[in-house]
Amino acid sequence: MRVAVACPALGYRGIKLHAFGDARKDAALCLALREHVGDDLPLMYDGSAGFDLPDAIYLGRALSEAGYLWYEEPIPSRHLCMAISNTTYFESIVTSDPVRRPDEITPDGMLLAPTGPGISLPGTLDLPSPLQPYAEVS
């Protein structure tokens, strides 16, 4: 928590966490950080698309309770990104050289909404069986 005190003293106007990747540990840390820094410092959390839907909701409730400014990319779901009013950019990780534009991004940089049912999880994830019917297979 020393870093959380040092950053505002150095002029940082907010803190964004990338934490453990475990919804319960991260929820506890996020609540403790809010308690430690008080209500005036904006706090943000980046899930790095690392959660399934139940864990993302669990952590989201804790972040809401703690008054976090935003909850970035809790799950790899384009529907969610498009539903958040203050999301103006979609993060697309570049994993190849030469760079290849993903199919869900148009040539002019617009993100296409999934057209199928569910939460549009990519088929490449190792999903629990109840979520597998909602994965996109390309």
Image (cartoon, rainbow, N blue to C red):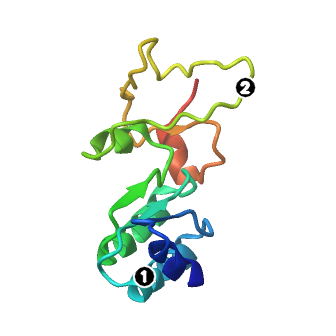
How far separated are the C-alphas under marks 2 and 1? 37 Å
Q: Is residue 76 above or below residue 26?
A: above
User: Which amino acid lies under the numbered mark 2 shown in the image of this protein?
Assistant: Ser
In terms of depth relative to the viewer, which is nearer, 93 or 61? 93
* Numbered badge on residue 134: none
Neighbourhood count class around disc 2 (C-alpha, 10 Å): few under 14, some 14–19, many 20 upward: few
Residue 63 % position (x, y): 37, 71
Q: Which residue is mark 2?
A: 96
At x 36%, y 45%, the residue is: 80
Q: Residue furthest left?
A: 85
Q: Is residue 107 above or below residue 136?
A: above
Residue 121 % position (x, y): 50, 41
At x 41%, y 37%, the residue is: 78
At x 53%, y 70%, the residue is: 23
Q: Quadrant of residue 95?
A: top right
Q: Residue furthest top?
A: 107
Q: Secondary structure at mark 1?
A: helix
Residue 72 % position (x, y): 43, 53
Query: Would residue 4 appear left or right of 39 to someone viewing this image?
Result: right
At x 75%, y 21%, the residue is: 97
Residue 13 % position (x, y): 39, 65
Q: How many marks?
A: 2
